Amino acid sequence: MSFKVTRRKFLQTASLAAATLPLAKVVSAETGFVRDPFTPPGSFAGTQTVTGGVCEMCFWRCQLVGKVRDKKLVKLEGNPKSIDNGKSICARGNAGIKLLYDPDRLKFPLKNIGERGKPVWKQISWQEALDECGARLKAVQEKYGSHSIAMFPHGASAKYPMDFFEKVVGTHNVSEASFFQCRGIRDSAYMATFSVPPDESVDMANAKAILLIGCHFGENVHVSHVKAYLKGLENGARLVVVDPRYSASAAKSHIWVQIKPGTDTAFLLAVMNYLVTKDKYDKNFVKAHCVGFAEFKQGIAHASLDWAAKICDVPAQQIQEVAELLAANAPNVSIHPGRHVSWHGNDFQRVRAQACLTALLGAVGVKGGFVKPKGVKVKGISWPGSEHGGEYNLRLLADKHHYAPPGTPTELIRDACISGKPYPIKGCVVWGQNPIQTIPNPQKTIAALQQMDFVMCVDIMPTDITMYADILLPEPCYLEKYDFIKTGTQWNFADKHQQYIAPRMPLVDAMFERRDGVWIMNEIARRMGHGDKIPVNSVEEKVNKELAAVNLSIDQLKKEDGIHIQDGKDPYGVEEDFEVLLYNEDLEDNGYPAVPTYIAVDDAPKGFARLVYGRAPVHTFNRSQNNVWLHHAMPVNPLWLNDEIAREMGLQDGDEIELVNSEGVKSSSKTVVKVTPGIRKDTVYMAHGYGSRNPLLTLGFHAGADDQELITRLAIDPETGCNGMRNNFVKIVKDGKALDIPA
Amino acid sequence: MQYGMIIDLDRCVGCHACTIACKAEWDVPADKERNWVRRLGPANTPEGLASTYYPGLCNHCNEPSCVPVCPADAIEKTFTDGKTGQTKTMEVAATYKDPFNGTVQIDQDRCLGCGACADACPYGARYVNTDIKNEEIGGEGIADKCTYCMPRVAKGLEPSCVQTCLANARIFGDLDDPNSEVARYVKKGAKGLTSAAVNIRPNSRYYGNRKDMHLLTTTSTPTEMPAASLRRSLMARLKPELRKVKNLGLLGLAGAVLVAGSDEGSNE
Amino acid sequence: MADIFRFLAQAMRYPAAEWFNDDFQSVLLQLLNELHWQEEQEELRLAMARAENFLEDVQIEHTRLFINAIPHVAAAPYASVHYKGDGTLYGAIAEQTKKFYRSKGFTLARENDLPDHLVYELEFLALLAKEDPDGQREFLYSLFTPWFDIFRNKVLREAHHPYYRIVVNLIDFFTREEL
């Protein structure tokens, strides 16, 4: 029975019986609500405020409250108790409820009884789905070995399953997009220089100068980070933006360096060489903390202003101006380490140069400099680990990419899948990642998937990759479950030092048959014969156990409105033994430059322009394309084209176009041209995360053009094995005709 | 008292949080908007290369062009000053300017959805939501626009867009109070989007550096008042007919339009 | 009528072997026979005869039409996806539907479920059929028919298999009769 009688109904019926009146007559006297005038009540009217939300529209994870009216989540707001995002959330955060109620979302376990890529879906029971996943993964493992299972995880709920496959099953073939197509290079390069991964730990709020290499805040939005950046500007920080495009940040800059893409390292070397030769670096800091200054000095001695000016296509005098500005404001300078840094295949060297420049300016542990916040650690509880040796580690076998971030470079996994060498990879688990759109050259990914014995996907949306699943399992989204514990500090170090702990808690119950990652993984683990190693029985138990280590619990956090706040620690200061490897001998031993070095990238062939991409403030990668509010905010991603070039080509602002790359790959959907003086002549730009090829996304399908499908020339960063994605060149196709771009 | 909103373009990063928060707060249809953010530029200005945003919303004008065109029946409405408790009774149609807080509001339960007000706004700040209608008065939809979140403000909350703005670029308050932050911004030079032809004294104002303000004002200021639309004049002529229809409470608006059509034919 | 609506609600649930059996199918065929829907009866018999696995055929069709599919879910069985709103779940009409249930003294047994699912609306019509014909008429007029018409047209256009074409036409037939 689907309905239950309410109390009101019961009373009504009882009284009717007593009065022996015909039921129908009395009930018909009721007036229907639909005649009431419609006035939207507002999120505050008749709603209950539910605390404990932690956003995952992106991975900054702002703290939320939900306004719930009669079981429906009507609005999300920043948790007023938050010392991170506060009462603010961004466009994507605000649009979370349209993800929650997206009709395209996955609802039930599905089995593909058609082909991979051309699925015919059938709803099946969890029992059947889990049995099949367990049995088929086990079969792959028994036939080809544990290493023959590859995993592509992304997001908070994928961590626990990733640990299962790495630690219990014992495969090295785990590849996270967040590392290999995004920020892994940054972490590795800082590790090789400062011995710590940098995150985005620059104290912009208290800086006197901020240097952004490609960062485009405003188009790229992480709430508390943008707050810190704006606070710095409000406090009078000088802003230098190095970008081929007049980005949202360039528009607020004091100096815009309109650099030729791919040459940033040359720019940084010239700045550093200028500081060194003009004696404008922090001698005390270098003496106290830097290793190999002499070799470093010698290694960058060739990088004159004129040398860089020619390479970077910017005036020598502007490079000097930037160097002077940084020196004048040292040490209170934020040299931003970047976030998505896998651009040209020479990126490790660039990011290392950013770290070295930070050190030369003495901008470590001081106001405005590189400052690691002192947050509280809440240790995650996961599967018991064991060492599996390096015998099947593709990276070690290839003896390449010695500075790879954790996991195995995607490219090596894909190559092994396709060639079967050094060993076959026959099982694939995709958990929250969309490798079709995150990894360049999707045809290769598809070929890798087609040769698998078994492919399973776990996701919340029917993303491109899910079309290749044999079994497709639905997870609750971040608003419907526990999974992650967000920790941190207040964003402005000038404010009282505080730490916070905020576990993600559900704002509404999960609908349909969506089940959380811990439950799914445990059930599959049991079926693979690893039931004895299950560390926790439920995600609530996991979160409670993790919180217990810091004397908290879910119940306690509920009492504290979702966020526990405690006194923090002063993050400023430098440990005496903090060491900066300006010259890194290990790098040299592995065959890489030991001092930051500029490695030239190919120029665009005649008639083509370089395609660069970036963020739209309303989208996170390709994850949010189908959100009805975000879609309407920016329905397409216009292609930025220099106004003089456009005039020569006869293109007008708003013209509908397609693109074709230098390898003949044509975009599968259209976008429009944005004609502007705010981009270099040799470069075109578009926001990433448009033009999905999955027709399951009612709104996202073919809305705008997809930069990713045009990225077929892959550069591999030698130190890390990460993908460089900005070495692709395009022509504009108008009315079916490919036009030369006369850069 | 005159409520007003300042948008500080030096702070705005164009993130759209304000527009989406508004959609959630007021159930605004996905393809309609009570407020908006348009990206401007990068473009050359006499002050240099500029790129900024036009975060627009209802201006709650001192001389609103949307109010006098409303063809709905006038009723007597009593307004109360939130501060002093003083009351004032005025005859108003379905949209009016509040005599105490200076906001322009809509009585949605009396709106016919004719769109005359939306046509009359030079800023395009109003839309007609056709998903909802007052069927008993033959409505075709209901006009909607920014209310400066008066129902939230009445509860002591900030407007939804102001609350969520991560840049603190939206400042809301009483322009008549010289100590308010909004009044201070006006003193510093915050300007409404007005031109020689369009000066209906808007109360949403913009502040920013010279190049951004140049780009904003040259691209986003309306330069003419909307022509009186056919629809609007039709509705105005229909007023007496509509009253009859409403009194009868039976015929829909479509019926009334047919009546008017034949009237018009006989006049010609 | 209550039995008819309950039967139609059942027919729209995900087909499972426990109920989508010979008994159910023969009742459906009998109903078509009673209504003199000869063509439909033939079509269904043919589909059954030709099917290697009739149950699985209908399951696949159900998944494709109502859950997830390529090119996309043809017709999600929720009012707010089709009518008044932006095509997402739990829109204004879903809230109105829930209020209507309540005004008639009912709430969903699983309160977190979406109130405007076709199956629930049919079950609700079955409840009203017994005791509140006026309420039933009002529900059909103001909340059910406006979206069901749109939904039915999508199913008729997108369906590959006769089963759901026939079921939505039956629903249409009986709900129109009631108006």
Image: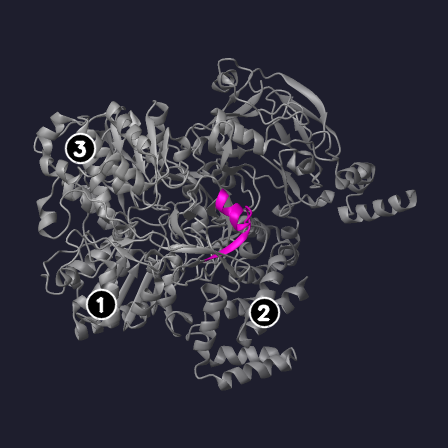
Whether labels 2 and 1 belong to a single chain: the reply is no
Q: Quadrant of the N terminus of chain C?
A: bottom right
Residue tagged 1 = A416
- Residue drawn 15% across and 62% down? A398
In the rendered image, the vertical position of residue C49 relative to residue A245, given as above or below:
below
Q: In the image, what residue type sits under mark 3?
A: Ala
- The x, y position of residue A621, in whole percent, is 37, 50
Residue with the mark numbered 3: A359
User: Which residue does the numbered mark 2 point to in the structure image?
Assistant: C157
Q: Is residue B243 left or right of residue A112?
A: right
C-alpha span from label 3 to label 2: 67 Å
Q: Which residues are magenta?
A: A643-659
The answer to which of marks 3 and 1 sits earlier in the sequence is: 3
Q: Nearer the viewer, residue A274 or C154?
A: A274
Quarter location, residue A578 = top left
Label 1: chain letter: A
Residue A319 among magenta residues: no
